[in-house]
Image (cartoon, rainbow, N blue to C red):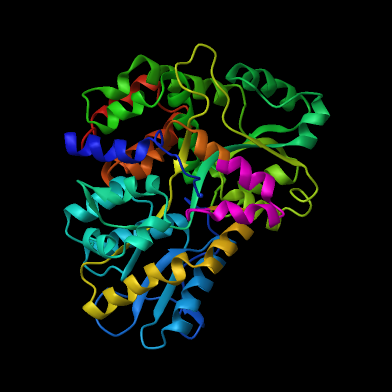
Amino acid sequence: MESRTTSRRNFLSLVSMGVPLGAALAACGGTGPTQTGAGGGTGNATASGGGGGSSATYWYLSTQPQEGVRTRTMERHNQANPNGKIEGTTFQNDAFKTKIKTAIGAGQAPTLIWGWGGGTLRSYVQAGQVEDLTSWFDQNAAVKDKLFPSAFGAATIDGKIYAMPCETLQPIVLYYDKRSFEKIGAQPPQTWGDIMDLVPKFNAKGIAPFSLGGQSRWTNMMWLEFLFDRLGGPEVFQAVFDGEKDAWSNPLAIQALGEVQKLVKADGFVKGFSSITADSNADQALLYTGKAAMMLHGGWTYGSMSTDGGDFVSGGNLGYMNFPPIDGGKGDPGNTVGNPGQYLSISSKATPEQKEIAKKFFSGALIDDTAVKEWVETGAVPIIKGADAQFAASKDKDFLTFVYNIAVNAKTFAQSWDQALSPTAAEVLLDNISKLFQLSISPQQFATNMNAVIGK
């Protein structure tokens, strides 16, 4: 298990960061895949495999404003490389996860495989489905040096690099509606105890304490990631990743599982949360329309709330903070969880021509100055060194600086659990998290079920 341990620790800790950091799981709009071809048209997509032709294929998530940046970046590459274009296909978050897994298993993956690295990437490597990019990065040191070193951990499996870190760094953020707090005459929570004390106060005013798109499951997971960390530090989940027997039965893990069920039983979440999807951005809408007071969600949601929420963001109504400490907890309150970056791999089944197109994309449009500028304009922190120089001119400079400081100061930036674990273990995890939030299983039953898939 040491190779897994070393790999995990490479991307779990940001202790040695002496340089500025740059910043999706992402919820998605739309009802199905659409395809953006080299000519820019859209239509129903077909499952394009990695082989054949002089153009490369690229699947990515269909959320705005992120989708727009990805599409325009691809279009800039196509304009500069008319004989080596990329054809893009967009999917909703959950649909993408299912589709890409099926395509890779059938040897029909797109040339460019978008993802979050970690355990899923490991499964691709073990199946021989993605290219080893180690020598390419050695030969293109300028590209590697342009990216933050911390981002390479989730791209590295057993000492070799299998993915290009890209896009943004996205910690999970505790957002709150300042207007809702004014209505109850309270301040944002400074501890977990404060959160529990606020719940009945908001409910008494007819405001849901927390919005949650629980049908999407991974949104529930963010609560456990922080509770595990704040109660016991990163070592609690590290033991799971390291494959330690019965690691989920750690007393601190059981306590964290119990704490979230206390919040559910206290009506801490909006009624019907298990039927609300994050893909539709309905959870965000509950916050910016004043129906919910707080929301724990990814840094990527700032951009969509700014775009869709009227004057909620521009009018100064949105507050944000890192998850508060738990009284008596062992975890460092400066730690964070989320996505150290997004990642692009190259299908091993792609033709030599397609692989070259992908590598030209990696060293060109994907990380050029225009891409950096556009990511900053979405309210996100790019993964490119020196990107913070553009914050001052941004209308979102306060939020960008907040995210930047979290990333720089965090002793540990833990990757989202469903990406750190193998696809097999991640699916069991998400299923049991859903049951935990629905109160259909106890913390002990959750631990028993999860202990059965440790190391699988």
Is residue 255 at all visible to an observer of this figure? yes
Task: Name which quarter of the figure residue 95 lies in.
Answer: bottom left
Q: Residue at x 79, y 52 (%)?
A: 311
Instruction: Give the x, y percent position of residue 257.
Output: 44, 23
Q: Is residue 454 magenta?
A: no
Seen from the viewer's position, the closer of residues 251 and 375 is 375
Q: Residue at x 31, y 19 (%)?
A: 249
Q: Residue at x 45, y 81 (%)?
A: 78
Quadrant in which the N terminus appears: top left
Instruction: Give the x, y percent position of residue 433.
Output: 42, 34
Instruction: Give the x, y percent position of residue 67.
Output: 53, 65
Seen from the viewer's position, the closer of residues 256 and 235 is 235
Instruction: Give the x, y percent position of residue 359.
Output: 32, 71
Q: Is residue 93 above or below residue 318?
A: below
Instruction: Say left or right for 247 vs 13.
Output: left
Quadrant in which the C terminus appears: top left
Q: Is residue 127 above or below residue 53?
A: above
Q: Is residue 165 above or below residue 443?
A: below
Q: Residue at x 51, y 33 (%)?
A: 409
Seen from the viewer's position, the closer of residues 264 and 90 is 90
Q: Which residues are magenta?
A: 382-404
The residue positioned farthest toward the bottom in the image shown:
83
Is residue 270 at all visible to an observer of this figure? no
